[in-house]
Image (spheres, grey):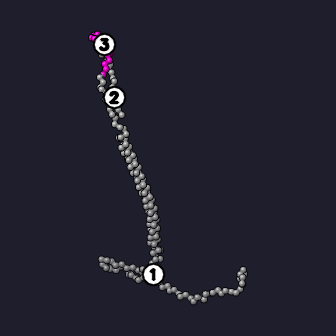
């Protein structure tokens, strides 16, 4: 596409201004009429503009590539966030289960440490309460108190079972049962 540039300006000159500072003196020359003088014009030149389609294509492709890269980055980031959210949910569930197990085990230990539970467990194992205790003073080796052995309770002996009577066995009778046919 070619464009022709031709400037066409004309300049006009205005009459010179008169000074107002000294009104007592008359102006030395009379005002000249305004004259029109044409300005010299340079010769007409042809300017070719570069094609507007050529530089737009790489720019459009760059913008589209940046938009696509941004979209892919957002999808990947959103996927990673959601994956971590699922992992966090699973870990929270696991932590709650472990907390419940810990509380149950602490409760079981507290029950087993109770004096009544310890006494019952000792009796099941055949242990008896200790007798009088004695202590040894370490620097001198002197024995304080008189130790007495623990006394075992009388042994419980199970009685043999008494002779049981013979079991009763039912024998079929030959009497007619109502509602049956012979």
Q: Residue at 41% x, 49% y: name it.
A: 71
**Span of residues in magenta:** 22-39
First in residue order: circle 2 vs circle 3 = 2
Q: Residue at 37% x, 39% y: name it.
A: 53
181 or 137, which lies in front?
181
Q: Is residue 38 left or right of residue 151?
A: left
Main secondary structure type of the part rendered in magenta: loop
Image location of residue 141, percent across then percent down: 31, 79
Q: Residue at 31% x, 27% y: name it.
A: 44
First in residue order: circle 3 vs circle 1 = 3
66 or 106, which lies in front?
66
Q: Quadrant of residue 168?
A: bottom right
First in residue order: circle 1 vs circle 2 = 2
Q: Quadrant of residue 180?
A: bottom right
130 is higher (above) or lower (below) than 163: above
Q: Quadrant of the C terminus?
A: bottom right
| Mark 3 to mark 1 CA distance (whole Å) | 145 Å
| Mark 2 to mark 3 CA distance (whole Å) | 38 Å
126 is higher (above) or lower (below) than 38: below
Q: Residue at 45% x, 80% y: name it.
A: 125
| Mark 1 to mark 2 CA distance (whole Å) | 123 Å
Which of pointers 2 and 3 indicates the residue nearer the eye?
A: 2
Q: Based on the picture, tell me whether residue 55 belongs to the magenta stretch.
A: no
Secondary element at tag 1: loop
Q: On the image, numbered disc 1 is attached to which residue? A: 126
Which of pointers 1 and 2 indicates the residue nearer the eye?
A: 2
Q: Note whether residue 12 is visible.
A: yes
| Mark number, residue 76 | none
């Amino acid at each position: 596409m070619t464009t022709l540039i031709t400037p066409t300006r004309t300049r006009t000159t205005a009459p010179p201004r008169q000074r107002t500072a000294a009104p007592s003196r008359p102006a030395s020359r009379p005002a000249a009429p305004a004259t029109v003088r044409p300005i010299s014009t340079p010769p007409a030149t042809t300017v070719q503009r570069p094609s507007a389609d050529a530089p737009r294509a790489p720019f459009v492709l760059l913008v589209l590539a940046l938009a696509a890269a941004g979209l892919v980055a957002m999808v990947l980031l959103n996927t990673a966030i959601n994956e971590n959210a699922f992992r966090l949910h699973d870990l929270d569930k696991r932590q709650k289960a472990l907390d419940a197990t810990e509380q149950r085990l602490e409760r079981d230990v507290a029950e087993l440490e109770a004096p009544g539970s310890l006494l019952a467990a000792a009796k099941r194992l055949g242990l008896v309460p200790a007798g009088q205790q004695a202590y040894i003073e370490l620097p001198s080796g002197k024995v304080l108190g008189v130790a007495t052995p623990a006394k075992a309770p009388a042994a419980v002996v199970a009685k043999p079972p008494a002779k049981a009577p013979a079991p009763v066995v039912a024998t079929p009778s030959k009497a007619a049962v109502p509602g049956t046919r012979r």
